[in-house]
Amino acid sequence: LIVLEGLVRFRILHELEPRSGYRRVQADFSEFELDRSPVEPAVDRLAILAILDRFADRRDLEFDRDLLDALAPGRLINTLSAALPFTAVEKQALLEARTTEDRAALLTTLRGIEIDSDSPADRYSPPTIH
């Protein structure tokens, strides 16, 4: 299992010649300078976790609350953004949110809309692994 962790997002300015089979690019980091900030974002983790609890209850899911409670606010938001079931468009919007606070607001909105929906077609069904 390989786990990759990004530190700073970037936009690709242009492709460079591959080296040793690896893709290379000239990157522009200017749009995402805040990614380098060591300051934890100001997010309402209790509100985020309350929405997560409501989501889990409606979908009959369980989350490791001890693990989530131990995460720093920025890590919590980024982990939930990556792990929760979102459409490709929603995931891209979360990825491109300018700040972690913006991502937290979007995460809250997306999950809140889904929780308030009573349509059975909107229910999340975890994938089956054979």
Image (cartoon, rainbow, N blue to C red):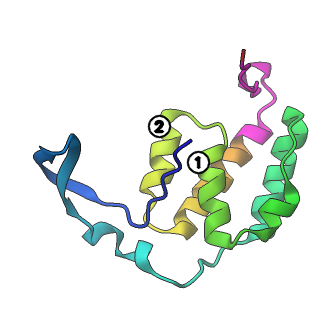
For this rendering, which residue is in front, 114 or 59?
59
Where is residue 101, by image quadrant? bottom right
Q: Is residue 45 above or below residue 23?
A: below
Query: Which SS class for mark 2?
Result: helix
Question: In which quadrant is the C terminus drawn?
Answer: top right
Residue lying farthest to the bottom in this orientation: 39
Crowding at mark 2 (Cα within 10 Å: few <14, some 14-19, many 20+)? few
Q: From the viewer's perspective, tell me whether residue 112 is left or right of residue 35.
A: right
Q: Nearer the viewer, mark 2 or mark 1?
A: 1
Q: How many marks?
A: 2
| Residue 30 among those drawn in magenta | no
Residue at 68%, 55% (x, y): give it: 108
Q: Is residue 105 left or right of residue 33?
A: right
From the image, tell me which residue sits under label 1. Answer: 82
User: Above or below — where is 93 with respect to 101?
Assistant: above
Instruction: Assess whether residue 122 is covered by the magenta stretch.
Output: yes
Q: Is residue 105 visible?
A: no
Residue 130 located left or right of residue 53: left
User: Mark 2 — residue?
Assistant: 89
Q: Earlier in the sequence, mark 2 or mark 1?
A: 1
Magenta extent: 114-129
